[in-house]
Image (spheres, rainbow, N blue to C red):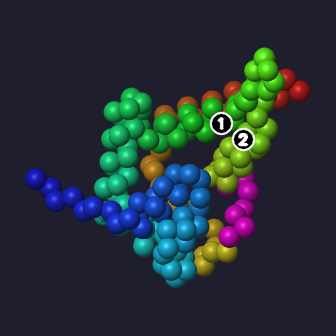
Amino acid sequence: MKNKVKPTEKQKLAVMGILQGKSARRAMIDAKYTEVSASHPKQNLIDRPGVQSYVAKLDKASQAKFGISLESKMIDTTLEGLEATKLFGKDAVKHPDWGSRYNFLKLVSDVTGKTKSSEPTSETNQQYNFFQVNTVEREAFHNKLKEFLRKNNDKE
């Protein structure tokens, strides 16, 4: 039986920060890592055995609960967020939730590299792919995003 390494509380907090859309550096700082450690997230967080086992555990939980990988669930949730609505008035009429949509669009923009982070980094042009995305899932995400953008551009 393989000996699993458990993540520390700081590692769990940092991973959860990344899953919430924070940069790895910001998530590490919020989890009380030092500035120096946070400047090298791949080395000091992402590649750590405790973090790898924690992400695998989260993925397994996502598979059990939703029937899809954690990565796929994150993509679906993000796409749903781009169409967020809220209810107004005594008749509970649905209207676009522009604030939520903006936040999800900003997240997509940050993740896809369309905007630059305002956080200083110790290296230039660094990118961390926390999860490996296979070609089929990546194409499915791109197609869903294109469809969403096309549909919403037609409404205007």
Q: Which residue is mark 2?
A: 100
Occupied quadrant, residue 123: bottom right
Q: Is residue 54 visible?
A: yes
Q: Residue furthest front?
A: 90
Occupied quadrant, residue 88: top right
Is 154 situated left or right of 20 in this image?
right
Is 11 situated left or right of 19 in this image?
left
Is 156 situated left or right of 55 in this image?
right
Residue 132 in picture, x, y percent from top left:
44, 49
Q: Residue furthest left?
A: 1
- Would you say the residues marked 1 and 2 are in contact, meaning their CB atoms lie under 8 Å apart? yes
The C terminus, quarter of image: top right
Nearest to the observer: residue 54 or residue 129: 54
> SS of the residue at dot 1?
helix
Q: Is residue 114 magenta?
A: yes
Nearest to the observer: residue 129 or residue 5: 5
Residue at image location 52% in from the left, 41% down from the top: 74
Residue at image location 54% in from the left, 64% down from the top: 27
Q: Which residue is mark 1?
A: 81
Residue 122 in picture, x, y percent from top left:
60, 79
| Amino acid identity at mark 2 | Ser
| Amino acid identity at mark 1 | Gly
Identify the magenta region. 113-119
Q: Residue furthest right?
A: 156
Cα separation, mark 1 vs mark 2, equals: 7 Å
Is 84 situated left or right of 51 in this image?
right
